[in-house]
Image (cartoon, rainbow, N blue to C red):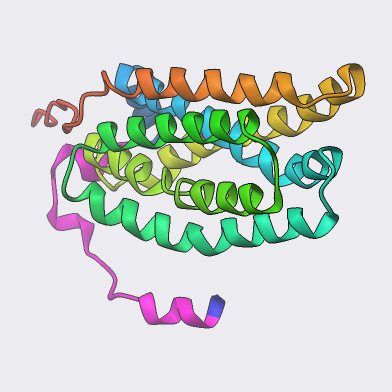
């Protein structure tokens, strides 16, 4: 990846000729502005669910399939299919994000994830259903990233986009930790993954709802007043 990064180099930009608020905004002000913005908070909270669902499935799906009587190969194939269809889903989400409101796209993705989980755990678990589930979840896997990062750019511009998306991704990682940890703890205590599966469904529905009120437009920011 490092050698390929050289192809993305661009000439240095002279920021001294710009006097808009975006250019001169400090990191502290950017963080205060973002965390004081209701839409950003909703976006960050919604991304928590993404991490919870993905990491739970990544770590515990193979064990779940073995627990349901399938071979260890079924889990490997299911996760492999997730990776394959993730390529398609991520590119498709980026394409759709340019053609429809990003908040609606996120809501649809979280809703479809919940429906996919319900269908998977309610129907008989077979090698075919496991691979089919992997394909569906692969399409919805990291497809949340393009609209999420896109919303950050739309609302706050690109000056501190990496930092602000980083905080959103931190929420994603906390969700991932809890998905993995709770999966193990609840299985050890109950002998089943059912509680965590249904918890992922509930979180998906909640995220689908809280993404809908997001205001998908640049934040109103006052320009600096000359001395």
In the image, the segment drawn in magenta is: 3-25
**Residue 80 placed where, x, y %?**
65, 62
Q: Is residue 171 in view?
A: no
Where on the picture, by quarter, is residue 164? top left
Q: Residue at x 9, y 28 (%)?
A: 225
In-image side of 178 versus 90 (left or right): right
Q: Residue at x 81, y 38 (%)?
A: 68
Q: Residue at x 26, y 32 (%)?
A: 104
Q: Residue at x 46, y 63 (%)?
A: 87
Where on the picture, by quarter, is residue 196? top right
115 falls in the magenta region = no
Q: In the rendered picture of this protein, how many numbered marks are placed on residues?
A: 0
**Residue 128 placed where, x, y %?**
64, 53
Looking at the picture, tell me which residue is in the foreground, 60 or 9: 60
Which quarter shows the C terminus?
A: top left
Looking at the picture, tell me which residue is in the foreground, 207 or 120: 120
In-image side of 161 versus 82 (left or right): left
Where on the picture, by quarter, is residue 216? top left
Residue positioned most to the front: 124
Asked if 194 appears above or below 69 in the picture, the reply is above
Asked if 95 appears above or below 4 in the picture, the reply is above
In-image side of 95 versus 90 (left or right): left
21 falls in the magenta region = yes
**Residue 156 placed where, x, y %?**
26, 36
Asked if 178 appears above or below 60 in the picture, the reply is above
Q: Is residue 212 in view?
A: yes
**Residue 110 placed where, x, y %?**
43, 32
Looking at the picture, tell me which residue is in the foreground, 6 or 44: 44
Looking at the picture, tell me which residue is in the foreground, 200 or 47: 200
């Amino acid at each position: 990846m490092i050698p390929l990064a050289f192809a993305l180099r661009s000439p240095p930009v002279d920021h001294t000729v710009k006097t808009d608020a975006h250019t001169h905004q400090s990191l502290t002000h950017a963080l205060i502005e973002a965390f004081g913005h209701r839409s950003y908070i909703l976006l960050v909270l919604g991304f928590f669910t993404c991490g919870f669902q993905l990491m739970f499935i990544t770590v515990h799906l193979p064990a779940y399939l073995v627990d349901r009587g399938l071979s260890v190969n079924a889990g490997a194939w299911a996760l492999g299919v997730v990776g394959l269809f993730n390529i398609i889903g991520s590119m498709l989400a980026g394409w759709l994000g340019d053609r429809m409101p990003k908040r609606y796209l996120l809501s649809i993705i979280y809703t479809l994830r919940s429906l996919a989980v319900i269908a998977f755990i309610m129907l008989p678990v077979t090698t075919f259903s496991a691979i089919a589930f992997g394909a569906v979840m692969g399409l919805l896997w990291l497809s949340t990233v393009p609209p999420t990062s896109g919303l950050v750019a739309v609302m706050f511009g690109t000056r501190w986009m990496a930092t602000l998306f980083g905080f959103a991704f931190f929420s994603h990682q906390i969700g991932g930790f809890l998905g993995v940890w709770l999966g193990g703890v609840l299985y050890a205590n109950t002998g089943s993954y059912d509680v965590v599966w249904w918890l992922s469904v509930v979180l998906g529905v909640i995220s689908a709802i809280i993404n809908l009120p997001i205001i998908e437009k640049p934040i109103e920011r006052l320009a600096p007043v000359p001395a």
